[in-house]
Amino acid sequence: MDETPAILLEQVNKWYGSMHVLRDVSLSVAQGERVVVCGPSGSGKSTMIRCINRLEEHQQGRIVVDGTELTDDLRALDAIRREVGMVFQSFNLFPHLTILENCTLAPIQVRKMKRVEAEELAMEYLRRVRIPEQAKKYPGQLSGGQQQRVAIARALCMRPKIMLFDEPTSALDPEMIKEVLDTMVGLAETGMTMVCVTHEMGFARQVANRVVFMDRGEIVESGEPNALFENPQTDRLRLFLSQILRGH
Amino acid sequence: MSIALSSGATPARERPPLGTTGPVGWLRANLFGSWWSTALTLALGYVVVRFLWGFIDWALIRAVWTVPMGPHGPDATICRQMKGAGACWAVIGDKWRFILFGQYPYNEQWRPGICVALFIALYAASANRAFWRRELLYLWLGTLAVIFALMWGGFGPLQFVPDDQWGGLPITLILATFGLVAAFPLAILVALGRRSKELPVVRILCVVYVELIRGVPLISLLFMASVLFPLFMPEGLNPDKLLRAQVAIILFAGAYLAEVVRAGLQALPKGQSEAAEALGLSYWRKTRLIILPQALRLVIPPLVNTFIGFFKDTSLVLIIGIYDLLTAGKVALADPAWTGFAAEVYLVLAAIYFMFCFAMSRYSHGLELRLAAARGR
Amino acid sequence: MSHAAGDPRLIGAQQAPRKPWRLSWSDPRTRNVVWQVVVIGAVGAVLWYLIGNTNRNLAARHIATGFGFLGRTAGIPIGEQPIPYNSATDTFAKALLEGILNTLKVAVVGIILATIWGTLIGIGRTSRNWLVARLTAIYVETLRDIPVLLQLLFWYTLLQGLPAPRQAMRLGSIFLSNRGIKIPVLVWSGAYSWAVLGGVLGIGLTVVWARWAKRRRDETGSAPPVWPVALGLIIGLPVLIWALLGAPHVVDAPALHGFNFVGGATITPEYAALLLGLSIYTAAYIAEIVRSGIQSVPHGQWEAAGALGLRRGTVLRMVVLPQALRVIIPPMTSQYLNLTKNSSLAVAIGYQDIVSIANTTLNQTGQAIEGIAIIMAVYLVISLSISLFMNWYNARMALVER
Ligand SMILES: Nc1ncnc2c1ncn2[C@@H]1O[C@H](COP(=O)(O)OP(=O)(O)OP(=O)(O)O)[C@@H](O)[C@H]1O
Ligand SMILES: [Mg+2]
């Protein structure tokens, strides 16, 4: 494995107006590492993960992704967006494009791929998420789980080195959650670097190298999943875990 | 998810970096975010400052407020010597009574003045949701009756003033308001007719009426009113010009309002109608007691917007020579003493129209937000 | 609604035996028929009454109805003539045709200008720059709250207040004076006609090429370039023809001669004021439509496209606009119709559109019914064409989704 971390956050701070939403967040994700982020609502999980591909800007500290520091430089931003794929809670597929066009848009526009190649690539990933037969349909015609798998395929079509997931299953019905999680497990097995915000503890135990617990904008605890869940060090994590378990 | 853990405002352990909050942060975020934004801000800022300064210079600093009286009325020579460098507000000072009230007898102009005040009070009362009850309808009818009585007079000490001497702002208000009041029942019937599935003939008639009126400009209806209505009437009966224009505006408003009402009827969930039928209500009872009260409430904001449209559109009666606000302004300009000062008069007219329309549009916008919030709950 | 037709239960319900119709007031069908007969009777009676009155009035005034007057010599002087017209010899029909063309001239150009200007303002409303957002908001709110007729009169007065030709304001070889705007024009020669023909041919070829390219993409997956070829065919071809024919270009520039201009083309103050007033006013409404269209596209679409590495411009073009357009088009249609109908206000500033000429006609001939019928018919046809076109376009746009 490479020495340089895939993602490095150093003392990152962020405010919305005068509300402090990220406090001295430091995190290093090695190449091929799979990190699960959890924490109560409003604790800054989404904000942190969105800072990694600069959907949000941080105001203090350093974020280095794949050796490139995130600054105002647009060229650096382009480079990072190309290497980092993202999957959203609400899928965000483009409703006016077919599934295939959803997947080929960025490879053609950003990677300047030929359409045939892009379509081949897209079909390959659609097969990998097990819905190649839906390629000619429109997003509105698919179930939530299928849409989320398309969203994963769409991100993979850019051949990213890092994948970010922001609660990819929390908008789904229970029976659909499994199909999406299976896809993500399959992806993890390919050695992809992943940062995933989720409350699916089973998934965390199965694939994560590390779980990070956030609360009030801080990383409170982090560690190997079983150790963290069995033996929480702080009251905050203990309370959180008890509520998660009660919720299920 | 639990809120308990992260509840409350987090105590700021550290201040946000300088220049991201407060006035500096605001400027940075909203005016100088990127160099492209900065360039836009500077260029537009320059244009705005130049324009505003030019306007202030013209309208205030170099403006002429009064002119001396010459042998044949006011003498605007000083204004003309400015050659357009400064506004000549003296024209307003001389003509404002005429612009507001037209040819209404000068000494009786307090009557249309009161009418304008009554109209504004009526609008203000209707804007208050606490008054949205059946009594409001009587208030409208009563106020309109008082307004017409005041305008015509002819009883007690009030001298009779025929309506071809009315003019100015009251005409604009009468045409718009009375047009709305009279068109409204028509619009409801047409909207219901257009939605009736069992009465195809009625439906077709309503569709033809609405689409015909909406497909032609208001001017053509006003022309129709001024040249065709006399032909339609039996010999000897010749309704006066104002009434004819009012009828044209009612027909026009009816079609547009019908579409607004129809949108409200359509937006109402089907369950309401079915529930009413299940209770055994007849068509008219169901419509009057269940459907209309809800549908009309729903369309109040677009109704206000449509009314703003009529209010502006009444200015078209200028073309058939009726003395509304705009016509009065234009006639005032025809006075040889004041030719060449159109910009001043038009600006004042624009300001009057703007005040009415802006107030209504703000109101409708606010109402829309409140109704949407109430529905969201 | 649509899938109800395919529902077997409903088909069954439709084919269920109908109950016999009883001639009784308690049968709803009887009531429906009676109501409709009453309505037809009432409408018929009113029409009968009005037509009877009209006939008596016309007879009393010795006016013969009919469109025979259209063939008579009009004698209406027309300032703005899209096609050559002689007031001494040409007929009312020809004069009315001039009016229709003048209406179309102002409506078509006005729609184009209002769309461009309104779209810019609408995009400005969504700007993150506070000054831009504020100024465009003020523009929209102010202009929407002032009657368009007042605005037209205002612009017309401003244009008339321009200096006389001798002191005309000058921008290159464009002159601004109270006689209107004088602009240089190219002197038409055979080469231009051929070039126009080439352009039309180019458009045709482009359509054929685009069809072929699409088929080829469907078959082989590789799409031949469309835009460069289209550009070459539609612009390159005419330019090439023009160049081959010796690239003639004689410009007829306006010049001051005595008290007036010679040469060049004129945009009359009436036309300019009408165009300016209508476009500026309608643009305020179009801006609101464009703004709400853009804002109807969820923010997540921007984010998802951004996360894929697409640039802002590409996101706007490929992701946001196609979605926004579907929200924008229906209300846009009614604004186009409004602009067209408002062009009838031309009569107030002396631009000779169809309303103005029909009005003069009915004053001269006394044929009031015919005159107003002509005005209404013209607008109904225009309204109907615009809404048919827009419905077709809308259906096409809607198809894209499902
Ligand atoms: N655009 C914004 N403007 C202002 N405040 C924001 C914005 N986005 C997020 N916040 C605030 O920042 C804090 C962190 O939000 P964030 O979305 O990161 O939480 P989260 O941990 O992802 O919560 P959840 O589990 O509900 O998704 C919250 O208090 C939220 O209200
Ligand atoms: Mg979140």
Image: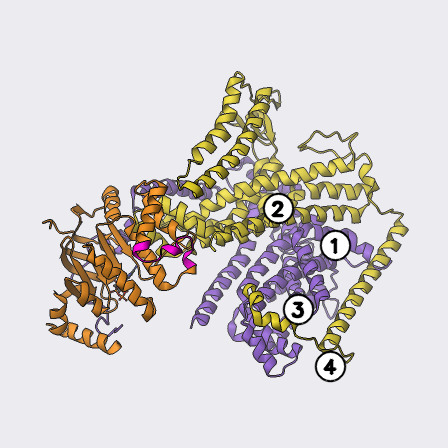
- The reply to whether dot 2 and dot 3 touch (C-beta < 8 Å) is no
Q: Which mark is residue B225?
A: 1
Query: Across the whole image, how many numbered discs are drawn on residues?
Result: 4
Q: In this picture, which residue range is highlighted in magenta?
A: A127-140
Residues under labels 3 and 4: Cα distance?
19 Å
Mark 4, residue position: C26
Closer to the camera in the image, B315 or B208: B208
Residue type indicated by callout 1 = Ala
> Does residue B71 appear in the picture of this structure?
no
Q: Which mark is residue C340?
A: 2
Query: Are both tags, 2 and 3, on one chain?
Result: no
Which circle, 1 or 4, is nearer the viewer? Answer: 4
Which circle, 2 or 4, is nearer the viewer? Answer: 4
- The reply to whether dot 3 and dot 1 touch (C-beta < 8 Å) is no
What colour is chain B?
Answer: purple
Helix, strand or loop at label 1? It is helix
Which circle, 1 or 2, is nearer the viewer? Answer: 2
Q: Quarter holding the C terminus of chain A?
A: bottom left
What colour is chain C?
Answer: yellow
